[in-house]
Structures are given as C-alpha cells and as structure tokens.
Image (spheres, helix red, strand yellow):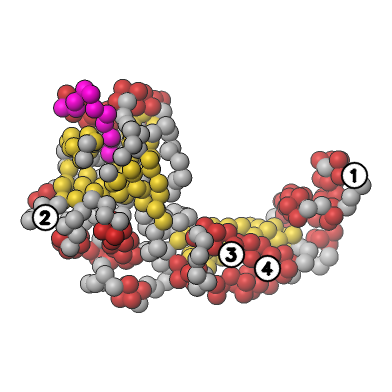
Amino acid sequence: MKVAITADLHLSARHFSGDFEQDKFSKNIQGLPKNQQNRWLVFREIVNFCLDHKIKHLICAGDLLEEPDSAAIISRVIAGARQVNFYFICGNHDYFLSQKLFPSLPNLFVFDKPAIVEIGSRIFAFLPYQEAEPLIKSFMELKPKIPEDKDVVLVSHSDIASDKDYSKSADCENKKMYFPLTKKDLQIISPLAVFLGHIHQPQVNPVFQKVFYCTSPCALDHTEIGLRKFLLADFNASLPKVEFVHLKQGFVFYEFEIFVFAKDEEEVIKTQAESIINKMFEDLGAGTKAGILAERAVLSIKVKGATSQGIPFVEDVVKAALGERVFKLFLDVSGLAVGRGAAVLEKIEQHAKAIFSADFKHYKNRQVYGLSGDLTSEIMQRACREVVRCLK
C-alpha cells in the first residue's frame, strides 16, 4: 500500500480564477508572484498523480484551506477522484475544518478531533492541531484504542521539539512551542513513522529518527526556497519507505549571492551567473527543458563585495546575465561597497596577499591567482570583506 502525504497548501477561494486550466491562472499573475493561484494547480497535480499511479490514499496534514469558502472548490476535485480516499486534519489555519463542510463525499474523511483509523493493514493516529496543548496529550487519549500488537503511524500538524523547548510553567508561558512533539514523547509513543504538517521548507531525510516534515508543495513567498515536493510512503514492507515526488506546477524560489571584488567585474559576474543557472537546472532535474527557468524560477540575488565600476554598472551586468532567463529577478546591492579607481583593487590585493601568506603557506611558491578558482575566490572574498568594512 502506498499513501501520498502533503500539507500546508493554504488554498484560498480569493485566489481561484474559476477554472483549473493553467493559462487562465498565468494571465492574472502581476508584480511579485505570491504563488497563491498556483496552489490550486499543485493540488490538482497531486491528485492527478494519485490517479495516474493508482495511489488510493491521500493525506493532508493540516492547513489545506485558508477559509471555509474554499471547501466548495476543492470538493469539485475530490468528487472527480472517487478512486482516491482523502484524509484531512485541522491545522492552525484551517481550524474550522469539519465533515459538514463537505457533504455527499464518501471518499473524504475530515478529522477535527483525534482519531484512530485503519488504512489497509496499518493503524494511523490522526491528531489535528490543538491550541496551546502538547501533542502527547491528544495521543494519550487515543492510546487505549490502539491494538497492542499494532504499530502506529502518527499524522499531525506540529513540530519536533526538545524537551526544554516546551514548558507549562508560568515563566515559560510566552515561549511555549506550538502544539509540540518532543523527543521524549517519541519514546513514549514509539511510532512506526511520523508525518507532520506546519513546517514549509523542503527536506531530503527525516528531521529526527522516523519524523518527516510533509513540507508545503507550493511556496508561499520568496522566503520558501527550493524545489517543492510531496511525500509518497510505501507501507508494503515492515518499515515504510518514504520518497519525495517533485512537482511540476508552481514557482520555484531561489536565493544566491554574487561576489564582486573590483577586478574583471563583468567577467566575474558572468561566470557566477552561469554557475547559478546550472545549479537551478540541476535542482529542477535531468531532462529539464531550456525554457523552464523563464516559466518557474523566481530568483533573488544579493551582490556583495566592492566595485570600482559603480553600482549601476554591476546592476546592468547582473540583469543582462540573468534577467531574461528567469521568470522574475530581484536584485539586492545593499551589501556592495563602491571604491573609485584602482585604489580599491590595490587595497583588496594587499589584503589578499596578507591572507595568502598567513593562511596558505603550503602554497608559498605560487601566486594568489595561480590557485584553483575556489581557493582564489575564498581569499579574494575575505580580503574584500576587510576592505568593504573600511569603505563603509
């Protein structure tokens, strides 16, 4: 048995254009792309994946919706996918979720209270968000209902915490973690696996032992960087095998730095720009078509270091190297210092030689620029930071 697991879609009726056709969404995107409209497409993509691969169960671990009005829209998708059973729990945003919002959908199960459910041959404990309560309290209410000879799979909208992060004492009242699952709790529960909503950032491995963050399959804004995914858990073996499935809809946000050190500035910028392009292609996977970055990549670049050519020159070179190759480019040059003429370069090179002499004595017979590209860049960046501090 395979189960698809996701969370934190934050679907809103306010951002639904009336149809699930992508062209009707893309026409409405203006300015800073918030990616809300794409979220509906991403949900549809996950459901289609389940249908195409005969996955019979799809779990959302909280924060599926932003308001009750969205239930009518998502019901259309669920009604058209009768081969899939849907399991939703409440998160801190969709605390209002209940079965009453979804009438006449026999393949949908909504849990607004803790519940034990058998899916296939596995026992699942669904623990919806409870404000200002530890997760273990909800679990202990369910424990008598769990067969002693069965391992439990825990699904909740929570975060893994150390025992010191959560306290019921008055002194720590303002520091309490939100509906936490502590490492001590895991010893008590001893689950087969744990799947948690709430944390949006993608991951590769369990965050702790058997604990997986479901991650948001569609970035909420530019702070949520990296390729978006959902989980596919295979429960056919004694221990579940979990893999991440990459999604083809929605923007992918990236953040990179470009370092300028007042020498061959245009060439240096173009070289780093090509490296950034290659990293994004690598992230998006083999076989990525050439135009995919212009369709999906939203790129934030922080330019640091020192320039003798001036900030407008650096901005123009960066925009020429990257601007037309991504969907949208955001440029931050606040970390770039300006030093006129050759003096700034001379100061940087003086610092570079001092660093080279002090820290790279095993290369004493070679010049700074005779080192590998990575070592040269490291030395020049350290030197440039010293000069930038003086310039600022």
Assess whether residue 315 is covered by the magenta stretch: no
Taking the spot 54% from the left edge, 62% from the top edge, the residue there is 281
Q: Residue at x 39, y 59 (%)?
A: 247
Q: Sequence-wise, which precedes: disc 1 or disc 3?
A: 3
Left-right relation of 35 to 293:
left
- Observer-nearest of 97 and 30: 97
Reading the image, the residue beneath label 3 is 277
Circle 1 sits in a helix, a strand or a loop, which is it? loop
Give, as a three-letter code, the residue at label 2: Leu
Per the rendered image, the range of residues in magenta is 145-155
In the picture of the structure, the residue carrying the numbered disc 1 is: 364
The residue under label 4 is which amino acid type? Answer: Lys
Residue bearing mark 2:
105
Q: Quadrant of residue 362?
A: top right
In the rendered structure, which disc, 3 or 2, sits on the residue that comes first in sequence?
2
Confirm or deny contact between disc 4 and disc 2 (CB under 8 A). Answer: no
User: Please, what is the three-letter code of the amino acid marked with disc 3?
Assistant: Ile
| Cβ atoms at labels 1 and 3 below 8 Å apart | no
Q: CA distance from mark 2 to mark 1?
A: 74 Å
Counting residues from the N terminus, which is met first, the one under dot 1 or under dot 4?
A: 4
Q: Nearer the viewer, mark 3 or mark 4?
A: 3
Spatial CA span between label 1 and label 3: 35 Å
Counting residues from the start of the chain, the first of labels 4 and 2 encountered is 2
The residue at the point 16 percent across, 57 percent down is 82
**Residue at image mark 4:** 270
Q: Earlier in the sequence, mark 3 or mark 4?
A: 4
Which residue occupies 29% across, 60% down? Answer: 52
